[in-house]
Image (cartoon, rainbow, N blue to C red):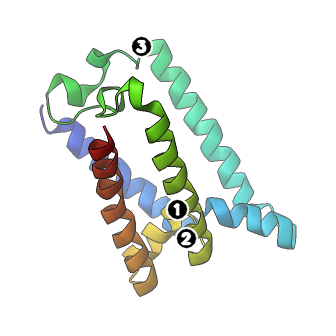
Amino acid sequence: MVYAFAIATLIIGFIAGFLFQRTGQCFIGAYRDLYLFKDTHLLKGVVGFFIGALAGYITLMLIADPFTAKSFPWVVYNVLTAIPGSIVKAKDLLSVLIVSTIGGFGIGFFSVAMGGCPMRNHVMAAEGNLSSIAYVTGFWVGIPVIYWIIWIIN
């Protein structure tokens, strides 16, 4: 039972990755195509993703309160810490906002420079695109670095 959540996450990830690869979905590309070509094909995926996320959130809210620590399975099994149990303290909110804003602008700039959103770059990296592999490597190396900077500031 301990591995059930990990296995379910892996299966859902494979299904989502397959669907994203087959549809060519890109959240940045959807707005690019809308403004440049007046094409709404990818924008329908963005709207569908938003509606699905909203439906999932409402479903979780009806089942259990997701903001209590006991509703997160990874906290119950002491495998990972949930976002509410992060290393960030409430008193250091300004430093977190500064670092997060710089990181947000960085990922936005580099995602647009790469020609797609992080999800699309993950799909292209899995397809063997070397520039996307470099982007994804920087993406996953940058996340612990930002948390390390926040930890040092705190």
Q: Earlier in the sequence, mark 3 or mark 1?
A: 3
Does residue 103 sit above or below 100 in this rendering? below
Quarter occupied by the C terminus = top left
C-alpha gap between disc 3 and disc 1: 31 Å
Residue 23 in percent (x, y) is at 58, 65
State yes or no: discs 3 and 1 in contact (Cβ < 8 Å): no
**Residue drawn at point x = 38 percent, y = 79 percent:** 134
> Judging from the image, what secondary structure is the residue with disc 2 in?
helix
**Residue drawn at point x = 34 percent, y = 71 percent:** 137
Task: State the mark number for residue 110.
Answer: 2
Q: Name which quarter of the figure residue 49 lies in.
A: top right
State yes or no: discs 1 and 2 in contact (Cβ < 8 Å): yes
Q: Name which quarter of the figure residue 84 lies in.
A: top left
Amino acid marked by disc 2 = Phe
Residue 63 in percent (x, y) is at 43, 14
Can residue 53 be seen at all in this image of the molecule?
yes
Number of marks drawn:
3
**Residue drawn at point x = 40 percent, y = 55 percent:** 15
Label 1: which residue? 107
State yes or no: discs 3 and 2 in contact (Cβ < 8 Å): no
Amino acid marked by disc 1 = Ile
Amino acid marked by disc 3 = Asp
> Judging from the image, what secondary structure is the residue with disc 1 in?
helix
**Residue drawn at point x = 72 percent, y = 53 percent:** 44
Q: Specify few, some or many for label 1: CA neighbours under 10 Å numbering under 14, 14-19, or 20 or more.
A: some
Residue furthest toward the right? Answer: 38
Q: Name which quarter of the figure residue 86 lies in.
A: top left
Q: Is residue 78 left or right of residue 84?
A: left
Does residue 85 sit above or below 112 in this rendering? above
Label 3: which residue? 65
